[in-house]
Amino acid sequence: MKLVLPIELLPVIRNTQACLQIDILPEKIGARYPVEVGLVGDSRLTLNALLPLLPRKYESDFLDSKQRAMRKWRSLLEEQGSRNDRPIKPQIVATILSDELEDDAIISVDSGTITSWAARYINIKKGMLFSLSGTLASMGCGLPYAIAAQIAFPKRQSVAFVGDGGFTMLMGDFATAVQYNLPIKVIIIKNNVLGMIRWEQMAFLGNPEFDIAFTPIDFARYAEACGGKGYTVTEPRDVKPILAEAMSEKKPTIVEVHVDPFDPPMPPQVDLEFVKKMVESFSKGQRYAKRIGLTLYGNQIHERLRDLHHHDHG
């Protein structure tokens, strides 16, 4: 029997698999996958009730294999989050921000490629709160979420981790944070494009990017004009010290970090269809095909060198 939680990607349907779904909303049972048994209730309470009914398994091969895979995945993220390439990799911004978060921090994330960087590289600990627009994926939510969190929890660190595309949609709200003296911290990944739209056009549709760039905005000067504090980061070596300084500010603060616009949030496993669509977009005249191709190739070289290094020291 396979346990399927509502947010899991659809598994491959096999005749030997039965599916049990737990959901707090009865109308969601069987909505995305054929279900043999549907249980309505809180997942923690339901699983706690089911556990005593299951025979204990003492073979640990499956668990061991998944733990090894997780250690390999974390090692890959650690390597990707510590590269000092120029332009700055968005991964290192998320990694360093993670180190600057307090134990009870509230992190609000916008929709787009920023969601992937946050999910992979920010270490959410017990006691923290994490918010994003997970169902509708509405852009522009990061800043107002952070403002609301700071009002609700004035003693806690409230951080918005956003892309420049999402931030521009509701950037006027930063003036509201200044007006009410809410010391939120807004970390902006700045690449002057709607990044997720670029990669969807290429990797899902096989088309060259279209109408995804916008005029650069000096967000640091904007923060100062509103009465807050603004920082700009253009060099990898400056990410850590400037983030550390910004997080200690007592007024609303924006940190804009200029990052590599050609580094996509690649899926953990790249299938043939993904590669086919990317090549198709190149053949149709993708404007930055060479830059994107070099970035993808460079990332692969880094991963191969990392694997060789781990093998030599294994």
Image (cartoon, helix red, strand yellow):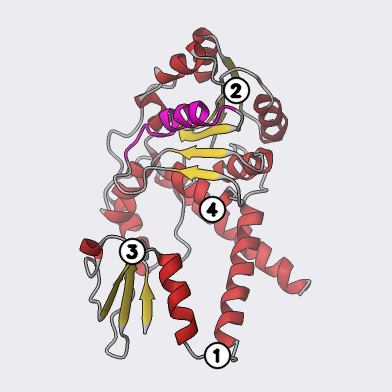
> Do the residues bearing badges 4 and 3 touch, measured as CB atoms within 8 Å?
no
Between the residue at mark 2 and the residue at mark 3, the CA separation in whole angstroms equals: 40 Å
Q: Residue furthest right?
A: 313
Give the residue type at disc 2: Thr
Give the number of the disc on residue 57.
1
N-terminal-most mark, 4 or 3:
3
Mark positioned earlier in the residue sequence (2 or 3):
3
Circle 2 SS class: strand
Describe residue 272's horizontal placement relative to residue 225 as left or right.
Answer: left
* Front residue of this view, candidates 163 and 183: 183
Of mark 3 and mark 1, the one earlier in the sequence is 3
Disc 4 packing (10 Å; few <14; some 14–19; many ≥20): some
Spatial CA span between label 4 and label 3: 20 Å
Q: Nearer the viewer, mark 1 or mark 2?
A: 1
Tell me if mark 2 has few (under 14), some (14-19) or many (20+) residues whose alpha carbon lies within 10 angstroms of its own: many
Of tags 2 and 3, which is closer to the observer?
A: 3
| Percent x, y of residue 169 | 35, 26
**Along the line of sight, which residue is nearer the eye, 179 or 247?**
179
The residue singled out by tag 4 in the image is: 120
Amino acid marked by disc 1: Lys
Mark 1 or 4: in front is 1
- Spatial distance from mark 3 to mark 1, Cα to Cα? 26 Å
